Image (cartoon, grey):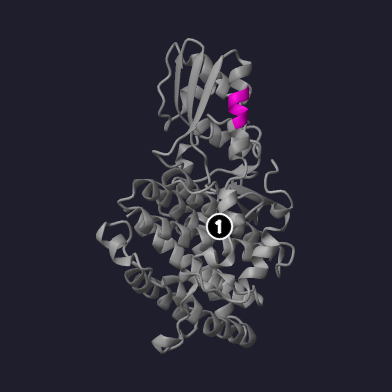
Amino acid sequence: MNEAIKDLLYRMADDELIIGHRNSEWTGLGPILEEDIAFSSIAQDQIGHAVANYTLLNEHFGEPVPDVIAFSRNEKEFRCSQFVELPIGDYAFSLMRHFLFDHAESLRYARLSDSSFAPLAALAKKIKGELKYHTLHADLWVKKLGMGTEESHARMQTALNEAFPYALGIFEPSKYEEELVAEKIAIGETALQTEWLDVISPLLQRANLTLPKLPIKERVYGGRQGYHTEYLQPLLDEMTEVYRLDPAATW
Amino acid sequence: MVNLSTPSAASNDRAVFDAPRNDSNHKAFSVLETVMDPEIPTLSVMDLGMITNVAVSDNTVSVRFLPTFVACPATSYIRNNIEEALHHAGFKSVQVDLETEMNWTSARISELGRKKLEAFGLGAPVAIDGVLDFAQIEHVACPHCGSTNTELRSMFGSTLCRSIHYCNDCKQGFERFKPL
């Protein structure tokens, strides 16, 4: 059971750390000041949520402290989905990824607030309220740009087409799936994906955007088993650059 | 204008306050009323509802501390300030533990805390019972003139706990402490 919970926490925390790092790349570059601040704040939340999950790994499963977990592992050890590794692209892509990812996170934490692993349930209750700001923000902009000009609509649709196969990779089941469901730790990735599609479909429709019809083999799996895109290692190199100068330094 | 000069007033004014005050912990509570939030320096950790229990025996005090937002960068800073303030006040042994049994919500901000927020120029959060919808953040009361003819400019402000708004009546921008 411990291995199953550890794997779940690593998947969640690695997703949050990497997408948080990606979103922070908008700091100073946002298309308008408010969006610059929004992406920076969302990144700060996500990295904070990663730290909270790494802390559970440290306190309950004897894993190293959060900084060591975050900055000392190689690419193969990361359990993030490939979706979060992709470069920020244009603003439409980052916004669409934010929409797809944060709705998945929001539903995941809502369900985890009933987890039989009490420390995770307590954390989930706290985080799910914070994520409401993320999804409200994403919904507002997806609608605004989906219903905006011909160009804004086209760019949002292109972003959705590119992001969707990767977004399905969020729900790549792990080998511990049955165990997690049987022990009521989590509801399982398949059930979560169904809930997610039920939530995002009407929101996209309202924004005049069409969810691509995708043959099942085109969904992008692999991240949860340590197979990553060419983009993850350069991100890790940059993220750990200062840490590697002196891993024992106190800040 | 609210009178903000008497910290002892805070104790009578806390609808959502959980730690009972008694003769033995009274001094510790008074110290905690002087530990301010670094981002809103007129509000103490007591005003913000960040303390859930205080136990004192002899010269030993233990405090349970409830952070606001998970990713708040000031958490460890505030925790250190609590320890230092209690040591400074003469407690020989001070223990500050993170409260994990409950969640912080903006309903924990005391009535006085809400008034202090407004005096500081920040809109106070409404109670949301854990369910936030867009209507609760769209037209919030302006802390300068009280008008609700305002609009939301951004759900994310200068810190994690603030959103940005604009008042159409007094033509001023303002921030609000986010309901959570």
Q: Amino acid at mark 1?
A: Gln
Closest to the observer, B49 or A18: A18
**Would you say A107 lies left or right of B106 here?**
left
Q: Quadrant of residue B144?
A: top right
Q: Position of residue A35 (x, y in %)?
A: 66, 64
Closest to the observer, A27 or B108: A27
**Would you say B125 lies left or right of B150 here?**
left
Subunit of mark 1?
A
Q: Position of residue B68 (x, y in %)?
A: 52, 42
Closest to the observer, A162 or A72: A72
Q: Secondary structure at mark 1?
A: helix
Q: Position of residue A64 (x, y in %)?
A: 53, 48
Report if residue B148 is visible in the image: no
Q: Residue at x 46, y 69 (%)?
A: A224
Region rendered in magenta: B80-84
The quarter of the rendered structure image containing the N terminus of chain A is: bottom left
**Would you say B23 lies left or right of A43 here?**
left
Residue extending furthest toward the left: A182
Q: Residue at x 48, y 80 (%)?
A: A220
Q: Which residue is mark 1?
A: A46
Q: Position of residue A67 (x, y in %)?
A: 60, 49
Rendered position, B11 above or below B59: below
* Label 1 neighbour load within 10 Å: few <14, some 14-19, many 20+: many
The quarter of the rendered structure image containing the C terminus of chain A is: top right
Residue B148 belongs to magenta span: no
Rendered position, B76 above or below A187: above
